[in-house]
Structures are given as C-alpha cells and as structure tokens.
Image (tube, coloured by chain):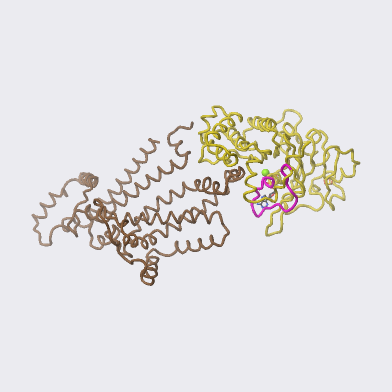
Amino acid sequence: MTGPVLSVRNLRVEFPTRHGTLRAVDDISFDIAAGEVLGVVGESGAGKSMTGTAVIGLLEPPGRIAGGEVRLKGQRIDNLAGEALRRIRGRRIGMVFQDPLTSLNPLYRVGEQIIETMRTHLPMSEAQARRRAIELLSEVGIQGASDRLDSYPHQFSGGMRQRVVLALALCAEPELIVADEPTTALDVSIQAQIIQLIKRLCRERGTAVMLITHDMGVIAETADRVAVMYAGRIAEIGQVADVVQRPSHPYTKGLMGSIPTLEGSETRLVQIPGSMPRLTAIPQGCAFNPRCPQAFARCFLEQPAAVFVGRSEVACWLASATPVQGTP
Amino acid sequence: MLAFAIRRLIEAAFVMLTVALLSFVLFRFVGDPINQIVSQDASLEERIRLREDLGLNDPIPVQFGRFVWKAMNLDFGVSYQVKQPVITILMDRFPATLELAFAAALFAIAIGIPMGVYTGIHRHSMLSKWFLSISLIGISLPTFLIGILLIYVFAVKLGWLPSYGRGETVKIGFWKTGLLTWSGLKALILPAITLGLFQMTLITRLVRSEMLEVLRTDYIKFARARGLSNRAVYFGHALKNTLVPVVTIIGLQVGAIIAFAIITETVFQWPGMGLLFIKSVQTADIPVMSAYLLLVAFMFVVINFIVDLLYVAIDPRIRLAGSGAGH
Ligand SMILES: Nc1ncnc2c1ncn2[C@@H]1O[C@H](COP(=O)(O)OP(=O)(O)O)[C@@H](O)[C@H]1O
Ligand code: SF4
Ligand SMILES: [Mg+2]
C-alpha cells in the first residue's frame, strides 16, 4: 500500500497579537489516503478552517504555521513559499470555499476562469482548455455546458455556482481537495446533491478529500473517517462508523446526542450546554473541562494526549484510563 | 443596452436644458444687453429699434427657444468686448484648455493608478508610506501654490521648463495644437502636473482603498487558492474589480479638471478658455460667460455619458441588468 496523500503531523497555527500569541490550531495530526474522505467537524471557531488554510498555504499573515509538518505524497509543503507553493495550489490541492456566491470573480465568464486556471497549471492550448472546460462543466452537472461556459457567475444560481467552483477546484486534476463548509451557504434542498457530487467525482478520480463541516449528518453520510475538533485540537478521530456509533470522547458523545435519530431537521452542533472557550481563555488541562459532565481532577491540571481506543484516537483522560483494546 | 443609452441621453438632454436656462437668464437679464452693445450716446429710437431687431420684446419662452436653437447651431452671439462671434473666440481657446485637461488627466491616471495598486498591495512598505505622504501634500496644498512652487523650482531655479504660455503651436484645421512641437510639449508639463496633481492623489488613494477592499474578498482568496500568479491575481482579478468606482471618480474629476483649469491657466498664463472666462468676468462680457458655461456643462455631460458606457464595458452585471436579459 502506498502512503497517504496528505499527512499532517503536530501542526500548530499561531497568531501573534498584542495580547500574546493565540494558538488557533494546536498539535494536530491526521492522514488522508487517496480516494478517502476525511470529515473535519466541530463548532464554529474550533480551528477547522485554519487547518484547511494551513494545508493549502493560504494563512493570512500574521497567522503562521508555528510547528509540525504537512506532507503531500511524502513531500513537505509547509515550508514552501512563493512560487513553489503557488504551483501546488490549484494544481495538486484544490480548494472549495463556503460561499459560492462570492468565490467567483463577478467580472469574468466562468469559462474564462476555468480556462485560466487550467492553463496556469497545465500545458494546454486555449482550444484544448476550452474543450476540457466544457467536459468538466457537464461532469459537475451543468446543462448546456458549451453555452454556459460564456455566462457570468451572476447568471447561475447558488447551487450551480458551487458546481462551477467544484469544476474550478478539480480542473487541474489535484490529488487533494479541501472543501471548507461547501454546502453551508446553500439551500438545504441542494446540499445533499453537492455533497454527493463531491464524493462521486473524487472517488472516480481517487482524489483525497478534506471535508470541513459542522454538520454531523453530512459527515455520517459522506466521510470515511472523521476528525472531531475542539478548541484547536482533535478530540477524537477514527472511522465514521466507530465515532458515530461508539463515540469515546465526552464531547463527541455530546455531539452524537445532537443528531436526531428519526427524520429531524436539526443536525447542528449546539446541544452541549455552554460554549467553546475563546482562544484567549482556554482553560488549563483539557479545554473541554468546563462543559464536560465527566471531568475529574486530572482534567483541570494536564492536557490529555491522544490514545487509541479501538481503531479511533481519543484525547481524553477517561480513554487513557481504559485499557488499550488493540492496535490498528 | 440601447434602452440604457437612450435613457442616459434623455437625462443628458435635461441637464443641458437646465444649464441652458441658467445661461439664458445670465445672458438676458444680467445687465441690459442693449447698453452693452450700443454706445453711450445712442438715441432712444436707435435703442428701441435694436431691441426689436434682437427680439428682446418677444415673449420670454420664445426668446429662450431661440437662444437654445442658436446655441445648438453654435451661435452664442457676439462678444461685447472683442466684437467677434463668441464661438470664434471660444474655438480659438478651446484646444488649449482641452489639451491641458487631457494631459493633466493622463498624468493623474498614469501615475495615480500604478501608485494606488502598489500602495494597496505593499501596504506596509517604506515606499508606500512615502507615496501616501506625498499624496497628502497633493491633497492639502492649493493648486495655485503648487503651480507657483513648480514654477519657482523648474522654471526659475533650474530653468528647465518655461513658466508661462503654450510654446509654439501648429494649426491643424481650426485646431491649434501644442502637442506637435518640442516647446509646446515642454510648456505643457508644469501646468499639466499642477492641474492633475490633486486628481492624481485622489486616484492613488481611491485605487489603494479599493484594492485593499477587493484583496479581502473571497474571489481573490479563491484565485490564490487556484494557484494563479500574483500578477494575474493583482492585475487580472483585483484591479479590474476596482475600476467601476475608479472610473466614476475619474469621470467626475475630468469635469473638475476642466473647470479648475481656470486657476492653472491664470497661474501659467495659459491661453485657454479658463483665462478667457476670467477676463470675460472682469469685463462683464456676458455672452462669453454664458457660452463658456454651456460648453463646460456640455463636456461634463459627454464625459458622464462615456463613463456610463465604460461601466457597461467593465461590469457584466450592469450590462445584463440594463438590457433586462438575465440569461
Ligand atoms: N486573523 C485572526 N487573528 C486571530 N485569531 C483568528 C484569526 N482568524 C481566526 N482566528 C481564530 O482562530 C480560531 C479558529 O478559527 P477557524 O479555523 O476559522 O474556525 P472554524 O473554521 O472551525 O469555525 C477562532 O477562534 C478564530 O477566532
Ligand atoms: S479529559 Fe476530562 S474534561 Fe476532557 S473530555 Fe476527558 S473527561 Fe472530559
Ligand atoms: Mg470555518
């Protein structure tokens, strides 16, 4: 078996501010294999976007990667800069942002934007790129692609625009897609379609996907594995089936409690009492301790490190106490 | 698109009519035209006959109609002072002002936009801070002072450039141009900088703040995520999105440049319409004043129309909304 497409080890992202350094991402490690979908889930402010942005090298200064490493097919990319990094973005890592209404430049035809991206990365003639762009637009489900190529973004609906964005992310055949809340801004009725489309296209191509969302329902349906983030750290990471059915971390348990078992509408993560601490006020010990129903003395003193529980890794003192149930 | 153009044309016609009314009131009611034309000792019969000949006894609306009709045929009457048709005098001066305004606008745009882009991209660089400090001077110093300073340095101290006049001109048809001779071009530099400096700083600051705004948008972040080169991101995607407000301001400012040419022309004794206007005010040469007013208004309107067309060329959302076709 070949190694993972993306390998993140002990990643830390920091923002120096006047009141000291804020750590938005703290010691995060995960892998994503080819064709695999890793869901990254957590409340707003947990550090999901920061992690995705750090992977693709788009952190806005003064934010910076303060430690750890990011490898793409074994090659370190976290220490690349300028031109070398630019050649990876769009070419080897595609990105999909939350709001399709604002992701596309309003002044250029969608075809122009796709062709521009392809020709930036691949040795293609204008005509070749145009033909490829039409194929790609049909592939993402846009009817009459050869005509729609010459439309402007505002002539598409939100869902259609996200399809265009997806075509743009995929147009240079990247090995990894980072999709940051790709359906949050969309109408509920089309969210599932877009998620399914991402999943299908990436599976066909063997593209690894980092799917950031705060919707546990999306994760349950789409992801192969899931990382649950809390206050900049990974609370629990494992196979979706394991994490959803047998959550080990008290935070994950709380989240699972918030997924309706029947056909409900509320799948958002708000059911745990209290709220996530701000970066300036992360408590000592386990960051979840103020909200944790099972917290005990040690939780207020020391930060728990991740340990294996079954096939999952869990950062909780309760898990450390239970005997290791086997190695993967 | 056509409907849009027609609507704009109708609006423009309204603006022109309003200015024409103003100009007419000035022409007809400020002072008695007869007194300005005839000599002091003209007889009463002479005056009455002239009044009748000039149509000054007709109903006011008829007179206004005649005024507009004549103006449309470029007949603005005869200068009280020079006793020549106003249009002849204006056309003699018009090229000088237009060339000056054009050079000033070119200077403002050609320097202002790159400086705005640079200071927008390199927000914290030393050079940006320099540019912005200099632009603060451009905004705060009055035009005549800048003109005098430039004359002092480049004409008096260094002796590189002339301090007044247009240099040699060449006549092409009725158009007397200073752009084709070396001395004409040299004479243009200082007045153009003086006239355009304020607009240059305005454009710099506007482009800068628009760039800062645009660079924060999602589509720029997405353009970066797509791996586009900095050049493509800054000039292809960001700059174009700053252009709608920038073009608006430039359009308004070109009008202002023509209007403010009065000061620069006075400082540099530039033989343009502004200087003519100042003289006509001093001598109460009403026909020249009212024609100047109309001409400047006309240029404002034309420039605005061009700006509107530019919007449409830049932004497809305006284009498609204007034609009523969404798909
Ligand atoms: N420019 C910044 N300076 C300081 N802190 C920031 C900045 N941008 C984001 N943060 C903080 O980083 C944390 C993680 O943010 P983010 O990754 O966007 O969360 P998520 O995507 O999980 O909702 C948040 O607490 C946020 O307040
Ligand atoms: S470490 Fe303690 S406070 Fe943190 S989740 Fe586990 S039990 Fe709760
Ligand atoms: Mg986010």
Residue at horizontal 64%, vertical 32%?
A194
**Residue A142 located left or right of residue A314:** left
Specify the quarter for ligand 3: top right
Q: Is residue A62 magenta?
A: yes
Residue at horizontal 83%, vertical 35%?
A246
Residue at horizontal 54%, vertical 46%?
B232
In percent of width and height, residue A229 lies at 75, 43
Colour of chain B as rendered: brown
In percent of width and height, residue B35 lies at 16, 58
Residue furthest to the bottom in view is B157
**Residue B296 located left or right of residue A152:** left
**Residue A41 located left or right of residue A171:** right
As rendered, which of B8 and B125 lies closer to the eye? B125
**Count of marks placed on residues:** 0
Q: Split into 4 quadrants, where in the image is the N terminus of chain A?
A: top right
As rendered, which of A233 and A107 lies closer to the eye? A107
Residue B265 in view? yes
Colour of chain A as rendered: yellow
Residue A153 in view? no
Q: Split into 4 quadrants, where in the image is the C terminus of chain A?
A: top right
Residue furthest to the right in view is A323
Where are the magenta residues, as a range? Answer: A53-73
**Residue A297 located left or right of residue B67:** right
Quarter of the image where one finds residue A90 = top right
In percent of width and height, residue A183 lies at 65, 36
